[in-house]
Structures are given as C-alpha cells and as structure tokens.
Amino acid sequence: MATAGSVDDGKSTLVGRLLHDTKSVLADQLDAVERVSREKGLGVVDLALLTDGLRAEREQGITIDVAYRYFASPKRTFVLADCPGHVQYTRNTVTGSSTAHVLVLLVDARKGVLEQTRRHLAVAALLRVPHVVVAVNKMDLVGYDQAVFDEVAAAVTSVAADLGLGHAVAIPVSALEGDNVVEPSTRAPWYDGPSLLQLLEDLPAAEAAGEQPFRLPVQLTIRPQDAAVDPAHREYRGYAGQIASGSVHVGDAVTVLPLGRTTTVVGIDTADGPAEVAVAPQSVTLRLADEIDIARGDLIAGGAVPEPTQDLDGMVAWLHERPLRPGQRVIVKHTTRSVTAVVRDLSGRLDLDTMTPEPADTLALNDIGRVGLRLASPIMPDEYLASRRTGSFLLVDPQSGATLGAGMVRGDQAFSARSAVGLGQFWAWEI
C-alpha cells in the first residue's frame, strides 16, 4: 500500500499511528521518537518521526523520499510506502504507487480537494492502482462534523470517478488522536463504517498474476560450468528468470519472442527442485524441447503472445530535472531487455488542473505526457491495462544511467472505455 496527499495532510503521522497501534514499533524506536518530540517542545509524541528518517525531513517537518515500512495485523502483512506530498517530489509518489495494490489518499478536512489531491488521483488512475481509500484526516480540528466530512468525501470521490477510479471509499480519521485508524472512533457516532485498518484487511486481493497470460522475461541462459567434467550435466540448457505473470506447466506450448519460435516446456527447475507447475512471481528455470538461441531480454510467453514492435507509444511520467524533447536519445528498459531509442514525437501533456490534454513540445519534471518512441531493436510489451509488469517501461539516460521517466504502454480503447473525460480522453488522443 502507498500513502499520498497534499503537504501537511498528515501522511507520515497516519503511517506512524498505524505502526504504533498495531504494535509494530520497537521499544527503543518509540523511546527515541518520544525524546525527539520532547526536544522539539511538542506536547504529544510526533509519530511522523517513525517514517521521516532523513535529517532534512526531521528538520523541515516534511517527507522528501519514499519511506518503506512493514507491519502486520492478524489478517494481513503490509508493505507500506509513505510518499511525499510536495509537487517537486511527485516523482517519488509515482515510484511508491507503481507497485501498490491500494493507495490511501489523505485529505485535510479543513482544506478539501487541492491540486496535489487531483495530481495524486491522476497518478493512481494512470498506474492502475486497484483500490483507492480516501482518509479525510484532522477530523479533530473540525469537531468531528459530519457535514464537513460529507462535503469533502463527495468532492474527492467525484474527481476520482471522473478519472475512472470508481471505487474510492472515504473514512473520517484523526491520525493524531487515532480515531478510525486502527480502532473505531467513539467521537464520530454518525460513522458506522470500518476503521482504516479494518478496511485494508478486508479489501479483495488484486487480480492474481497467475490468472494472466504466461510471461517469463529471460534473465540468464544456464549451462553448468562442470558440464565438461560431469556427463550428466552435458546436455543441460535452461532459461532462468522471474515469472512476470501467469502460470506454466510441464508440457505447455510456449512461444519464444522476438524469434516467434514455438516449443514445449519439458522441465521446470526451482530452488527446491523440479516442479510440475510454476506461477508468478516465482523465479524458475525452464527447460525446452527444442534448442533455440535464447538470450537475456528475450520473452518466453504462453497464450495470446504480444507482437514484437520497434514503435512504442505510451504515457510517460517525467522524473528528471532536464526536460524531455523530441529527437532526444534514451535507453528503453522493458523487463530484462534494454534497447536504445529516439523520441519520435511528443503529443502533449496532461493538465492536472483540468485533467484534460494540452499541446506541449517538452515534458518538464513531474509532467505526465504522451510520447512516441522509435526503438533500435524490438521489444515485446503488453498493454499496461492488461499487465502492470510487462506493460511498463523505464527511460534511462545513455550517458549517466539515471532514470529519466516511467512509462506505461498505451491502450487507447481500454483506457477510453474507463472514462468519457479526463484520462480516457487523454489516452485516446490521436498521435
């Protein structure tokens, strides 16, 4: 799960409250936070210090980088990404949300929907985060007024619906006081829904990767080094990698891309020995019936296989200080394959105030835009709507190796069907 929201909406405090009230904080950590809180002259323990670990964060009272924390309840184990709220750190929110199954969006009950609220909802829609929970925070500062909560919740869920996020659930909370975070609050008797933790425990699991078409990006071809000494190893040839989606059985027909050769799986080797079946996200070695020239970056796929392409269209969240311009050379990293590419065209950017497309000839830091790329050699992408793993890519600087942008492979019909306006219109915008 990931947290998002505008500046000072209480994200780090909420995370600290979750850790504290689920008893996921060690005694020495809590002692240190209490000591620092006293030194700062605070009347209460500043639970935000449990996640704001950088010195600059503690000094300024803001979150700068994504902080990952782990905690557990009787029902589930959670990996939590506490994301920054400042506009200049939107790229960190993209990073934290890219692998999240649920986004907890905090909104200050006194301020309502702000630009960053819309920005983070747009990021959640683009990244296909399956669940969005709206935590209307600081209810203690508005006297737990139901009318205030209803107004803010209606405004946020309206924006979410326009973006295609039709299942945003709102909860009134006070991260500072702990109301409706782990335990239900007695100070908001008009609210009869679950607490935040109860909702997180009961949310349905995201679509299982094993139910999707089989995809194995090859990381390594394995030929044992002692093959010359041990005759039993002489004929062994396996293709190792982590299954990105789907499942594979011994005897399944698979296609090796970009060659397009079809063969049969004759063996599956795991760290625990041979297996008859493997599912995502297991790391395995496949043995195939035919000798095929397969190297790192190739894809072993089952079911409906993707078409290799050298023309890539997608939505890109730009993460670098240097702007992106047409004609720029980049490296596209897709699964285990890295190829050089040139920016063919830049169709425009998303206006995060109005959630509509606008013309643009550059992408600046934190912009989200439509980009066309011409690749030096083919890759095998799925649409991002179909698979977050094989439908995403990175843009990397060829000289420095710095990550420049995070991309999502375009699927016009699928995205335009999600919403008649906003992101749907943006995805369907013709290049």
Image: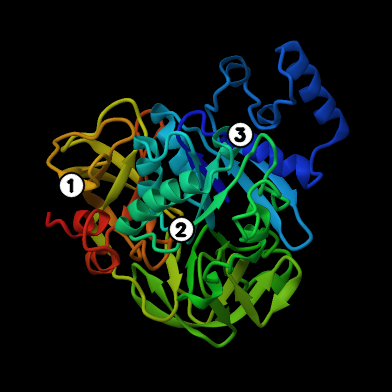
> Which-is-in-front pick, marks 3 and 2?
2
Residue type at mark 1?
A: Pro
For label 2, count other residues whose C-alpha is less than 10 Å away and answer few (under 14), some (14-19) or many (20+). many
Relative horizontal placement of residue 401, taking residue 17 as reference (left or right): left
**Residue under circle 2?**
168
The amino acid pointed to by label 2 is Ala
Among the two numbered marks 2 and 1 on one chain, the one whose residue lies closer to the N terminus: 2
Q: Which residue is drawn at 35% across and 30% down?
A: 320
Q: Residue at 43%, 66% (x, y): give it.
A: 299
Looking at the rendered image, the disc whose residue lies closer to the viewer, 1 or 3, is 3
SS class, disc 3: helix
The quadrant in which residue 412 appears is bottom left
Q: Is mark 1 on a helix, strand or loop?
A: strand
Dots 1 and 3: beta carbons under 8 Å? no
- From mark 2 to mark 1, how far is it between C-alphas? 24 Å
16 versus 311 height, above or below: above
Residue 326 percent across, percent down from the top left? 16, 38
Q: Which badge, 1 or 3, is on the more N-terminal residue?
A: 3
Residue 146 at x, y percent in the picture: 52, 48
Work out whether 55 lies above or below 29.
Answer: above
Q: Nearer the viewer, mark 2 or mark 1?
A: 2
Mark toward the start of the polypeptide (3 vs 2): 3
How many discs appear?
A: 3
The answer to whether residue 333 shows anywhere in this view is no
Q: Mark 3 points at which residue?
A: 12
Disc 3 marks which amino acid? Ser
Q: List the residue tagged with mark 1.
A: 357
